[in-house]
Image (cartoon, helix red, strand yellow):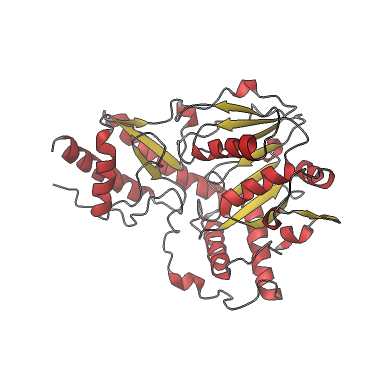
Amino acid sequence: MPPSHRPACANFSSGPCAKRPGWSLEALNGALLGRSHRAAAPRARLRAVIEKSGALLGMPPDWRLGIVPGSDTGAVEIALWSLLGPRPVDVLAFESFSAAWATDIVAQLRLPGARVFSAPYGELPDLARLDPAHDVVFAWNGTTSGVRMPNADWLAADRAGLAICDATSAAFAMDLPWDRLDVVTWSWQKCLGGEAAHGMLALSPRAAQRLQTHRPSWPMPKLFRLTDADGIIEGIFRGDTINTPSLLCVEDALDGLAWAETIGGLPALKARTEANLAVVAAWVARTPHAGFLARDPGSISPTAICLTLENPEAARAVAALLEAEAVAHDIAPYRDAPPGLRLWGGPTVDAADMRALLDWVDWAYAREVHA
């Protein structure tokens, strides 16, 4: 018989992710719809997203933070096209998105001497091979592989190159080592459950200096431009977005930030995330047919929790059955990831729901294997 208890929220997708507990459309009643994003009131709302995001994450006050188009993908691409070129670049590719950044750097920007350090799903590349004189591009957390950076010790404090970090499934769920990073990107639709298409781009003073002194040799599309003839376009970092944002999504982002502040800020968000990982870890420990895709326990992601099953052929059937039962939506692995399950464990997910879900996974797996 299937379990009698169900998750209160069945949304375990790794992006877009579950809304905060208690969310409803009424949270958006104050949205400034039908208004120009350049008007004073909407600009103030955009600026509030920037200021509240930076404060919640503990971003250093001398960094710049702006809202950019294209979600995290847009933010990363803007960074790559705007900043790379003056130095050799090393790229860490250990899951789908970091591999995409490597492809863009090698095949699109065609940077000479670019080095790609790859690792299979579940592992990290050899971080000791990086050159601190080079720029380095990497994901802090592998959204499609369930592997995260265990620490920042491999990033030299006195590095000459820039550290460009895709942090979209880590921001608001993990500590980010701001003193070892120069560019940090994320999107609204991950850890705080915001709506899609908006990205965040944070630049250290070192990255800003690169912007001021480096002019890329390739054409720069309007959507990528952070500078003009006068230097850095500072308005981008004060709420003057490059293109038209959705003010409905802006209101939703502010709602998520307000919820995070109410429950205790970043420490509370991290605690909720770690509680979800603890539930899954306890289940893996007592479940002989399941394991983590991450090989090293110290690199297991607490947000994009990727699992392997002893019978991999049953994995997609389990995901499909739980979808049909309206118990868990979107828990199949990413399209080019190994067979298994991918459970979002970020701060908008309640540990009680994760616990209930795993009881259903046990039921579905037994049903598929013994069918």
Q: Residue at x 25, y 42 (%)?
A: 317
In this orientation, does residue 123 appear? yes
164 sits to left or right of 314: right
Q: Residue furthest bottom?
A: 34
Q: Residue at x 31, y 45 (%)?
A: 355
Find residue 249 and report its horizontal and vertical position in percent.
54, 65
Q: Residue at x 63, y 47 (%)?
A: 77
Find residue 339 and report its horizontal and vertical position in percent.
34, 35
221 sits to left or right of 208: left
Q: Of 363 and 33, which appears nearest the observer?
A: 33
Which of the 4 image quarters holds residue 222? bottom right
Which of the 4 image quarters holds residue 37? bottom right
How many tags in the picture?
0
Q: Of 73 and 319, which appears nearest the observer?
A: 73
Relative height, residue 130 to residue 371 (above, below): above
In this orientation, does residue 139 appear? no
Find residue 326 and report its horizontal and vertical position in percent.
27, 56
Q: Quadrant of the C terminus?
A: top left
Find residue 331 and report its horizontal and vertical position in percent.
35, 46
163 sits to left or right of 188: right
